[in-house]
Image (tube, helix red, strand yellow):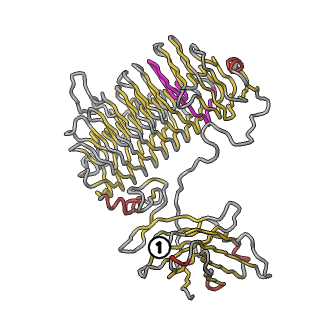
Amino acid sequence: MKKTLSIILALVLSLLMIPVGIISGAAVGEVETGYTPAAGSVAISSVAEFERIGTGDYYLTQDLDFSGKTYTNNIIAKLIGSLDGCGHSITGITISSTNSDAGIIAEISGSVKNLIVGTAASPAKISSTGSGKTVSGLIAVAKTANVSVENVKLYAEVSSVSTSGGVIGYLAASTAVIKNCEINGSINANGGAVSGGIVGRIKNSENIYAENCVNNANVTLSTGGTDWGAGGIFGCIERGVTAINCVNRGNVTTNANYAGGIIGFMSMNEGVGTVLVQKCSNYGTISGMNTGKQSDGSYQLTPETRYAAIGGIIGGDKDFQENRENTITIDKCMNYGLVKTNGTSAGAIMGKGTLCRDGEKTLKIVIKDTGNIGRVEYGKTDVEVGTFISVASTNSAGSLSISNCYNMGTTNSTKAYAGVYNMVGDSTIGDTAVSDFYFLDTAYFWAANAGNVAISNAAACTAEQFASGEVAYNLGFNFGQIIGTQSYPIPGEIAVVATGSVSAPFANLRRLATKANRASASYVQTTEVDTQGKQIVRFIVAVDSEALESAASAQMVITFKKAGSDDISYTLKNDEIKFFKSIKADGELYLADEGCAILGAVVTGVGSEVWSSVEITFTVKDAAGAEIALMSTSGAYSK
């Protein structure tokens, strides 16, 4: 049976894409098989031994059950050194205090890693009724030397009347690293000041780094002063922090003035601070029911009195002053959650922007490559607001920049801008600027109040334009989108390119690589039916481009198989095999990774009845006729 076999031709392109980081290996809190603790560490095999931990390096040899005991204040008063859980769990923990900080570890100067606390059915219960005291699911206070918490999973119910944090309550260490941590349960400051899913309050610390942390706990600040707040990752920060690839999935609720999916409240009046929130996402509902409301019940809207502090990523800022150069950067972040207030002070990405008075401050806020899907709801719907950033007030001493972003979320406000509402600003000097900004046409009439904001390349787009990949393409390779599956762009997703086709103007860009040892790797694409009801089957092989230099001959054999029937094979040799940097196939553009080349083959006119599986064998030989194993590959695929 004669079939048509042809090489798929493509233009050679030079393109880049930023991939999303993936955490691999053991689950959070666990360790890989064969893991061993550091030499010289002291083995902990019982509850009694755990209670005696103090100065030194320790590791757990087994799970520990603390059921039947209720501790006052803590189990470990102070850890100076390290605790390695080695993937084991500590369960049945109850700590109740009336006048002290409370946590499994009251104070630390050192590290904790590879530990699981509590279970979903029986979370650790840790509380304090002491005024001004700090409570945490793991470490109450960390304020000396360097601190690190890594690969820790907690199930905890944390409650205080002042400051609560899931992993650390009060953090004032000179340097702290919190990585690969997860909190489940509830974090509540009932009548207190601060509540945070990972850390409650950060004070006087400039080198705080959080990466790959996930908050699944509901975070609540039941009542409290107006200048405090709640956050999915950090409740309150008073210096600089960095949060990379962190996710909030819990609901964050406050009756104070500030709440955020990643950071609730920022007050850096005690020194220079740099805040970087990068590749972070919020899925939880962020709500504040007291924001913007004055003592007489009104909502005053002047720069000095209008509180705008409920945000999907960051709640708000205050006290950036005394000519200090502070910077807040939100980069490649997404808000998916509902953001709401009973007033007028909620923004999908940030609540209150910068407030500059009399040229005192030099705060810079930069928001770039960031998107919003979540809805923003206000209690007062007939006041001008911004749904990306609720309100900002700038002068030449400070600046706010929103660039290469989009807002596909909706709102209940009748006077909402898609970007920002700037109360005090000058569009001629660009102290507040919105550029390359795309928004849903049915939800907003414009990007910002143009009199106070410099606007460049803002565009209202339909839901169809978002779904087609057009907006992702316009945003560039920092965004991507799986066309046909995802209806909006996502930072770091598979990139979108223009095809030039009228019927399908945009396609996905996928990168193909060889195997880990640089050996060739074969790929098969989903088959499609042609106009005659026959199938089109596509194959792509990625090879090491350096190895091509020694190749003298090549052969590809494609064999269709079906039980009880004769195999049907196609063979390509030498001149029929061509290598490319990129190949367009099945509505997508495939790009060879660095150091790779790709070839593609398509078999047309194959009846679906003639095969149930297919094998592909690619063989390459050098000038002496010896097979080049690195470039040869084979694969078997089912229909």
Q: Nearer the viewer, residue 321 or 83?
A: 83
Question: Residue 148 colored magenta?
Answer: yes
In the displayed structure, does residue 613 sit left or right of residue 263? Answer: right
Q: Amino acid at mark 1?
A: Glu
Estimate the x, y position of residue 310 in percent, counting from the top left: 35, 35
- Determine if residue 395 is in view: no
- Secondary structure character of the magenta stretch overall: strand
Residue furthest to the bottom: 2
Range of residues picked out in magenta: 145-171
What residue would you read off at disc 1? 528
How far from the left and from the top, in percent, is residue 512? 58, 65
Residue 572 left/right relative to 355: right
Residue 30 image offset from top left, x and y in percent: 64, 38
**Residue at 44% across, 59% down:** 481
Up-down: is 1 above or below 102?
below
Seen from the viewer's position, the closer of residues 300 and 187 is: 187
Q: In this picture, is 37 found above or below 489?
A: above
